[in-house]
Each structure stands twice: as structure tokens, then as C-alpha cells.
Image (cartoon, rainbow, N blue to C red):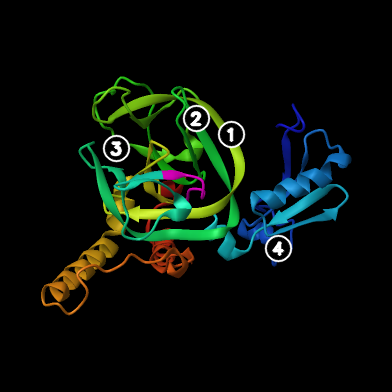
Amino acid sequence: MNMYPGVKLRVTEAWDDEGYHSPQSLHNEGRAVDITTSDRDRSKYGMLARLAVEAGFDFVYYESRGHIHCSVKPESAEARSGGCFSSNSTVQTETGRKRMSELNLGDRVLVITPDGQLDYSEVILFLDRDEKNNRTYLSIETERGAKITLTPHHLIFTETDNTTQDEWGSYATYAKNIQIGHYIYVVSHPTSSGNDQLILDKVVSITVATEGGIYAPLTQHGTVVVNDVVASCYAVMSDQNIAHWAFFPMRILHNFKQAFRTVLQKFHLVQLRTPKTPRTNQHTGIHWYATFLYTLTRTLFPRYLYT
């Protein structure tokens, strides 16, 4: 859109439902696509291939002079459909504002409770965490200047208008479904002395950018305020409530660990204060439970929950 105004992406082959490809073709698995530009100008195909690489395809090459072939590995198709925030995104903790790359397990970050109140909730794990890799993000900006950067399949709370200004709505949708003119929930900081407020702010701009770092913190409440915008901790599944219940075992396990540690502290079997996990020792990559849950729910739940 920026480099070639008016030129669109042209898909010549995707899912093969007519048997044109060999049985081993990735077109039969929905993991391959052949593309050109709408004007079929071959001088643009080199840049088109570069953009396809930046978009996250594992294999990009000139299959013929007529088009560019792009495909993904099975595990990549699964992993890249998740949702995260970039390393430059910030959250508000009890001790001040932190970048995602500085966030530790055990930090208490600003969230929205089920009844729409601002509160602080502990980060119990990272669903995904990778300091080195880049990913394609959507940057959603509001009328008041709030801006959140997240992956297209990450859930964000939204309303189609601001008639529910004084009511907290729990409707969440994929970031890719947000349109200019929709409203998202933003934390407003009054200039005079007073408490922060939750307001609906109109979306005025949506752009695509590639940024470094992949971070998906999970809080006890399943929500997190990022760059003053309210977002979910979840992705891939389009229902916030189902996703939150799906991680109930991990919250129970975390609470059990905390209770067990408290008992040990009471009997002076461990230090009264256990230091937080250093960032260098934290898990990198997709959390095992998230991977297990994704595989399980893809089999058990209807497809509409992922669209």
C-alpha cells in the first residue's frame, strides 16, 4: 500500500479443491499460496517476495516467472497465529511503568477486573516470550493519542460506539477485526488530582509494522493494560471467557505454589522474601501449556471460535 499505491495483492493459487497439484503439495494442506501484484508487473516481484518474508512465511521463492510461491511449516502456522505485544510496549506496575522486555514473573501490573475496576494483578507466566525475534504487529491509535501495538490474533476489548461509556463491556475480538471508528477502552489520567478512569476512545488509525520482541504475559485476571489501552492476555480463541477458563488449571497451580511457599515461610524453611525470577532465567518461547491447549482445543472446539 505504501510503496505501490493502488496496486493490490493478487492470489493465483491457495487451497487446492480441484486437484490441480500433486498429493504432496502444501496447497492441499492450506499452507501454501501463489501470489503476484494486481498489475502483474514482474519488476515488483522481488519486493513482493521480500514483503512475504517479512510477513512470516518460512519458504518464499520464484516457482515460475509468473508468480511467487510462499508456504509455512506446520509448527509455524500454529505458532504464528498466536498473540503478543512488542518489547517497546509498556505496562503500569505498582512500582512504576515498565517496558515488556523489563517485565518479570511476579510483577503486579495494571488490569481490569471482571466488574470493570482498575486493579493490580500478578504476572503468573508468559504464554510466549522471545526477545530476539521480530513479528508483524497492528498499531491501533485512538483519538486521544493512546496507541497499542499487538498481533492481529490478539484479543482486545471493543465497542462499536460510545453509548456504553459508563459501563464496562467484556466483549473482546481479534485486533484484526478492529476498524477505524470503533471504540476501545483506554485508561485516562486526569491532569488534576484524582483517580484514573476507564473511558471509551475512538480508533482513528490502524497501521502495520514489524517490531522486535514477542511478549504475552498472563495475569490472574486475564486482562492487562498496555500503553494505557485495555487488552486481553489471550489470543487464537475468539472468546475471552472460554480462554480464561481454559487457563484455570494454571492459575490454580500458581495459587497452590504460592500457598505452599507461604507455609514454608511461616515455619522459616525458606527466606521470608523470595526474589523474583531474573529475566535471564525466564522461559523463552511458547509456554508448554499454551501449546498443549492450542492443539487440544483445535480438535474439540468449533472452528468459528478461531475466526
Of circles 1 and 3, which is in front?
Answer: 1
N-terminal label among 1 and 2: 2
**Residue marked by disc 1:** 207
Q: Disc 1 marks which amino acid?
A: Thr
Q: Disc 2 marks which amino acid?
A: Glu
In the image, is 19 to the left or to the right of 88?
Answer: right
Q: Dot 2: within a 10 Å radius of its alpha carbon, few (fewer than 14), some, or many (20 or more) residues?
A: many
Given contact means CB atoms under 8 Å apart, are the residues at marks 4 and 2 in contact?
no
Mark 1 vs mark 3, CA separation in Å: 25 Å
Residue most toward the left?
267
Between 35 and 135, the one nearer to me in the picture: 135
Tell me the tag on residue 170. 3
Mark 4 vs mark 2, CA separation in Å: 41 Å
**Residue marked by disc 2:** 141
Which stretch is magenta?
82-90
Q: Disc 4 marks which amino acid?
A: Ser
Residue drawn at point x = 83 percent, y = 54 percent: 62
N-terminal label among 1 and 3: 3
Mark 1 vs mark 2, CA separation in Å: 9 Å
Number of numbered callouts drawn: 4
Mark 1 vs mark 4, CA separation in Å: 34 Å
Of circles 2 and 3, which is in front?
Answer: 2
Q: Dot 1: within a 10 Å radius of its alpha carbon, few (fewer than 14), some, or many (20 or more) residues?
A: few
N-terminal label among 4 and 2: 4
Of circles 1 and 4, which is in front?
Answer: 1
Tell me which corner region of the image, top left, top right, bottom left or bottom right, holds residue 72: bottom right
Is residue 137 visible from the viewing direction of this image?
yes
Tell me the tag on residue 46. none
Q: Position of residue 2 (x, y in %)?
A: 71, 31
Between 64 and 3, the one nearer to me in the picture: 3
Considering only vertical position in the picture, is 11 above or below 3? below
